[in-house]
Image (cartoon, helix red, strand yellow):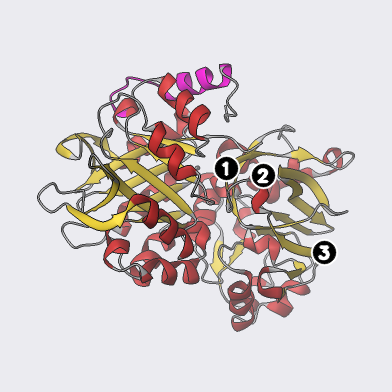
Amino acid sequence: MALGAKLMIADTGCCNLASVRFAFARLGVEALVSADPQVLQKAERLVLPGVGAAAAGMVALKAAGMEAMLTSFERPLLGICLGMQLLFKMSMETKTQCLGLIDGNVEALSAAAGPVPHMGWNTLEFTEGRPGHDPLLRGIEDGAYVYFLHSFAAKVSAATIAKTDYGMPFSAIVRQDNITGCQFHPERSGAVGAQVLQNFVEVAP
Amino acid sequence: MLAKRIIPCLDVMNGAVVKGVRFAGHEIVGDIVELAKRYGADGADELVFYDITASPQGRRVEAKWVERVARELDIPFTVAGGIRSVEDAAAILRAGADKISINSPALQNPDLIDVLAAQFGSQCIVAGIDSFWDGAEWQVKALTGDPDKMQTTKWRTKDWLVEVQKRGAGEVVLNCMNEDGRRAGYDCVQLSAMRALCTVPLIASGGAGKAQDFAEVFAKTNVDGALAASVFHKNILSIGALKMELCAQNIEIRL
């Protein structure tokens, strides 16, 4: 509980905020939800949720005055779904400039892969050499199913610790120093998702 | 690989889960949150809640039970029933639903799909379509929750399916009404025809009675998921046993 008390969720008015808060609550961790960057910058661990369009997401972040707080945040930060995509330099979804915390761009999934949005349970494939070192994957098996719901994704890069294939491989989980991102929804990914969130609270560096 | 989804559908009426045959003569099958948790534990990939009284009675689904479900459930769920505006949708999504499904209100006001997709993103906007074979065509019906108010619309199912995608629906649940509640198998002919016109995820609904019905709809129509109600509510088939059977038939399934 001591750790959890310092967990905060950035309120950008997006829709999966309640789900993320409830998922931590099921782990016995009460997160503080705030839209105030002054409050959020004191978080020991910070979650940036998000669903919807990148442009609207960035507008909401800027309107809340969160951009500078997020780019200078030095403790563990977890972006979920759109929240992860906003960590990159640019989203090709209406060519939106994002936070630029992680190298690379977010691109549209190809319709050749199958129906878009990519919706449903798909498998994680750990990047060789990375998982043994990454505390976020503690207790999770290579090949575990997690729930996706998205039309855009980041390519596999140096920051990728787990990828998923949907026509082409894309980044399912990324990490660069203190910054992590999940393209899937851990709050809706059953026991595997709960483990990811628990790892973020307990052991993420 | 992306797994095929098994989706129990819980028809909600006055705050309880009910099941009728061909949309009429409803009986209560249990408490919303209890059933939601049970299905989650059994391995359901997703749940759909249809407030079947909301549209005919001209009211929206209540946000209160949506939040109760969101607190307890760790898999995604969709809520449908009388969502007519951005405010209606926002209340349900804020309460913790992952997707909202619109059916009758979209038929009354097709622009609603565009507006909701623009506001919340296509990925959380599901179009529910109730399709009836009238002997000559697949025809879209509205207000199917109440037999006295049900209407035949001007839309052929094929045309409406294309229209809802053009307007921004991110998923389609196609309920084949002639099969609904009969437990005699999905309408693979109709689902194949509609799959060819559907570039977003397509969910089969209506007719599931045994494991082989699910195997058949996945093998023959390439739908992304299969929705079923009474076969699960009446314990005719457990989700665990169903998934083992589908796995044995080499269908990609999350166990």
Count numbered badges in the picture: 3
Mark 1 and mark 2: span between their CA atoms? 9 Å
Callout 3: few (<14), some (14-19), or many (20+) C-alpha neighbours within 10 Å?
Answer: some
Q: Secondary structure at mark 2?
A: helix
Q: Quadrant of residue A9?
A: bottom right
Same chain shared by disc 1 and disc 2: yes
Disc 1 marks which residue?
Answer: A189
Q: What's under tag 3, amino acid-wise? A: Gly
At a point 77% along the width and 73% down the height, the residue shown is A71
Whether the residues at callouts 1 and 2 have beta carbons within 8 Å, the answer is yes
Distance, label 3 to label 1, CA atoms, is: 26 Å
Q: Position of residue A193 (x, y in %)?
A: 61, 43
* Image spot of residue B220 (x, y percent): 49, 29
A97 to B14, vertically: above or below: below
Q: Is B242 within the magenta?
A: yes
Determine which of the numbered discs, if any, sits on residue A196 in the image.
Answer: 2
Asked whether disc 3 touches disc 1, contact meaning CB atoms under 8 Å apart, the reply is: no
In this picture, which residue range is highlighted in magenta?
Answer: B233-248
